[in-house]
């Protein structure tokens, strides 16, 4: 069976994708520097899958270490998640973001070319549609203006990939633009585990629900939307993971192709909170505060292309996303951090 290198495979989306790849019979090497993840997550992936896989602790900017991985394993495809993702941190420290995301990816691609591995799946983001994007977002819309270095780093990488695919017809590159990934594997053993106070809505809600945080702040309720709060296209992380499995399986495709991975449906922030309360029977205290700079009123995906070309479409409903996000947080109120000192409930 083919060996897939998953950079950033210990992270939130990477770990769920490793699980999906193992479930489809692929062999996997995870390459991760654990700067935003933990070994405990990988241990649990192996437990759920009932299979082992390789793990190399390393940085994508480390050329020698990466080269060694390609020498030691017969890699047929690289799924590239490794990178930094905090919008606010990227504004404070843009050089770090361009170094990790753009520099790191450039380094990885150079090593791949040297080792003659040309199949690449990339984690991009709906953020590349920019601040004035029309909805629904369609893949052939040009990159828009971005408000932060994180978004620009993703757009720059997309441009690099386009140039690379045009430079040599051996490349086979799939760019996946995620909308708002939430939820967790239904075992409740793996999930999203932000190191700091979450900036994203879903982990903020679940941390309020376990009383790690006192209340949710809703950033603005006077947008021109149905209930005045912003609307997003939330997608279950296992749906995303399965999209990656289909992208990896496109063995006969060459060049570069880009796909939105979303549900094609928009849900408001207020509806998310109300639906979470309904599903879990837990009240979420909230206060409405001012708008967060850079937030768009509405973002959702046109998902026609992924359906037509990849034969992929989201399967999980919003209540299921919320149930699974809650199961993970309830079983792991402190995320993976508690695992070394406290007993984990695997029931
Ligand atoms: P994450 O932080 O949980 O995972 C990223 C992983 O990459 C972590 O395990 C981290 O330790 C590792 N990593 C970071 N820099 C590295 C480096 N230089 N070398 C090796 N490993 C490194 O994030 P995630 O939510 O799983 O996101 C995965 C990818 O998807 C990222 O590229 C992110 O930009 C992109 N993305 C995420 C979202 C989202 O909302 N979560 C949306 C769109 C796109
Ligand atoms: C969703 C909505 C907030 C937190 C971000 C990145 C994007 C992509 C996905 C990586 C917004 C509101 C949030 C809170 C709130 N990541 N909100 N209170 O901003 O759509 O996208 O993550 O590529 O690049 O920008 O997601 O979860 O932060 O916010 O009211 O405490 O929830 O205003 O309307 P966003 P989000």
Image (spheres, helix red, strand yellow):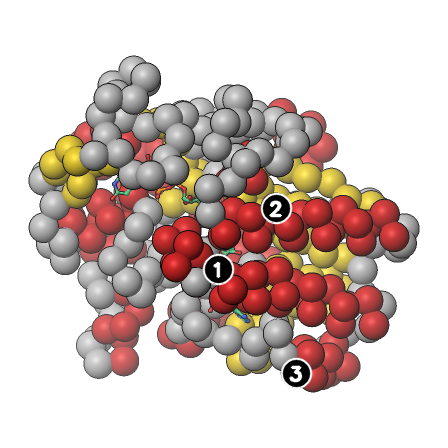
**The CB of the residue at mark 3 lies under 8 Å from ligand 1:** no
Q: Camera-side residue: 93 or 183? A: 93
Q: Based on the displayed image, in which of its 4 quarters is residue 330 positioned? A: bottom left
Q: Mark 2 and mark 3: span between their CA atoms?
A: 27 Å
How many dots with numbers? 3
Instruction: Name the residue located 54 percent from the left edge and 36 percent from the top edge.
Output: 145
How dense is the environment of label 2, judged by Cα within 10 Å: few (below 14), some, or many (20 and up)? many
Residue 347 makes an appearance in the image: no
Spot the residue most to the right: 169
Q: Quadrant of residue 212?
A: bottom left
Nearer mark to the viewer, of 1 and 2? 1
Q: Would residue 49 appear left or right of 341 to someone viewing this image?
A: right
User: Considering the image in quadrants, where does the N terminus appear?
Assistant: bottom right
Q: Is residue 333 visible?
A: yes
The residue positioned 66% from the left and 83% from the top of the image is 65
Q: Is residue 284 above or below residue 109?
A: above
Q: Is residue 275 left or right of residue 253?
A: left
Q: Earlier in the sequence, mark 1 or mark 2?
A: 1
Q: Decide if residue 169 is on the left or right side of residue 2.
A: right
Residue drawn at x 82%, y 73% as measured from the top left: 115
Residue at label 2? 155
């Amino acid at each position: 069976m083919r060996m897939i290198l998953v950079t950033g495979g210990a992270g939130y989306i990477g770990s769920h994708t490793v699980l999906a790849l193992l479930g489809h019979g692929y062999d996997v090497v995870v390459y991760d520097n654990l700067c935003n993840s933990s070994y405990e997550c990988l241990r649990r992936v192996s437990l759920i899958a009932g299979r082992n896989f390789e793990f190399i602790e390393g940085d994508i900017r480390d050329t020698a270490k990466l080269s060694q991985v390609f020498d030691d394993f017969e890699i047929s495809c690289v799924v590239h998640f490794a990178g930094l993702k905090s919008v606010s941190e990227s504004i404070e420290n843009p050089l770090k973001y361009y170094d990790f995301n753009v520099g790191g990816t450039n380094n990885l691609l150079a090593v791949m070319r040297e080792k003659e591995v040309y199949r690449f799946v990339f984690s991009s983001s709906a953020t590349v549609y920019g601040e004035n994007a029309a909805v629904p977002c369609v893949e052939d819309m040009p990159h828009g203006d971005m408000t932060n270095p994180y978004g620009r780093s993703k757009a720059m990488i997309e441009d690099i990939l386009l140039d690379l695919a045009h430079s040599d017809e051996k490349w086979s590159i799939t760019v996946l633009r995620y909308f708002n990934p939430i939820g967790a594997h239904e075992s409740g053993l793996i999930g999203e585990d932000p190191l700091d106070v979450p900036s994203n809505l879903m982990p903020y809600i679940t941390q309020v629900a376990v009383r790690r945080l006192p209340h949710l702040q809703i950033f603005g309720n006077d947008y021109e939307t149905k209930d005045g709060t912003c609307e997003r296209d939330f997608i279950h992380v296992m749906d995303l993971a399965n999209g990656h499995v289909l992208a990896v399986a496109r063995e006969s495709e060459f060049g570069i192709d880009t796909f939105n991975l979303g549900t094609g449906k928009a849900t408001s922030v207020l509806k998310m909170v109300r639906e979470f309360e309904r599903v879990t029977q837990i009240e979420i205290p909230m206060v409405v505060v001012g708008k967060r700079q850079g937030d768009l009123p509405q973002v959702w995906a046109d998902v026609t292309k992924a359906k037509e070309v990849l034969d992929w479409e989201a399967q999980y409903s919003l209540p299921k996303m919320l149930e699974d996000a809650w199961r993970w947080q309830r079983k792991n109120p402190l995320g993976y951090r508690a695992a070394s000192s406290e007993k984990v409930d695997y029931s």
